[in-house]
Amino acid sequence: MDRYCEKCGVKLKENAQFCQNCGAEVPKKTNFKRYGIIIIAVIIIAAALASSALFLNQTQVVKVDNVEFELPSDYVNDPSRTEVSYDENVKSSAMGWSNDKHYIEIGVTRTPGEGINSKEVASSLGGSPTKMFGYDGYYQKYDEKSYSFIFGLKDEVCMIYVSDYEAFEDVKVLGSA
């Protein structure tokens, strides 16, 4: 591609550093053709990685009875839901979610008002005293791959059951709604 002097407009010789007519310095050639494609490819790859990271890190807020939890968006709600009411005062609700790797079930039992000592009930269910999700509660291991954490939250007793210990990392307790 022919180049011309920016000052006087004369056609420049190949690889000229100065104009042969006026002596003006010739700006160095940029190798946009060589590096431009690489730069554009890097930008496209970076955009693809950023969008996939945003997609993978999306979450959903789920509500079991009066308590909200956050789960990754790849968990799908199991259509079965358990709702039990004892003597019109104690109410229990449980829901499950699964993805390609794990199953999570969350249960909440509550008594409206001050009718339940949630920490006492959680402790009566057994397990090892543990702190998870920012709450004191009780951790239980059922077999080689299933676990639960039971804790009190105001007038609710919450149980998070997971099919694999790693699934605990997928749950965030947001609290009572």
Image: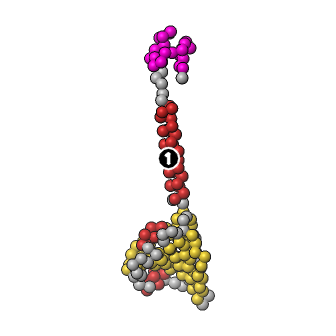
- Is disc 1 placed on a helix, strand or loop? helix
Where is residue 165? Give x, y as percent.
42, 72
Where is residue 74? Give x, y as percent.
54, 65
Please tell me which residue lies in front, 159 or 53.
53
Query: The C terminus lies in which quarter of the figure?
Result: bottom right
The residue that disc 1 covers is 46
Residue flagged by tag 1: what amino acid is it? Ala
Type of secondary structure dominating the magenta stretch: loop
Please tell me which residue lies in front, 32 or 75.
32
Where is residue 12? Give x, y as percent.
51, 15
Q: Residue furthest top?
A: 21
Q: Is residue 15 magenta?
A: yes
For disc 1, the neighbor class at 10 Å (few under 14, some 14 to 19, many from 20) is few
Q: Is residue 136 magenta?
A: no
Q: Which residue corresponds to the image point at 53% horizontal and 79% vertical from the top-left?
A: 107
Query: The N terminus lies in which quarter of the figure?
Result: top right
Instruction: Kindly tell me whether residue 12 is visible in this rendering.
Output: yes
Instruction: Kindly tell me whether residue 112 is visible in this rendering.
Output: no
User: Residue 9's quadrant in the figure?
Assistant: top right
Number of numbered labels in the structure image? 1
Color style of the picture: secondary structure
Q: Which residue corresponds to the image point at 45% horizontal and 82% vertical from the top-left?
A: 122
Q: Residue 75, relative to residue 21: is it above or below?
A: below
User: The magenta stretch spans which residues?
Assistant: 2-26
Please tell me which residue lies in front, 127 or 17.
17
Q: Residue 71, relative to residue 37: is it above or below?
A: below
Q: Residue 34, relative to residue 162: is it above or below?
A: above
Q: Which residue corresponds to the image point at 40% horizontal and 81% vertical from the top-left?
A: 143
User: Residue 131's quadrant in the figure?
Assistant: bottom left
Q: Which residue corresponds to the image point at 55% horizontal and 79% vertical from the top-left?
A: 94
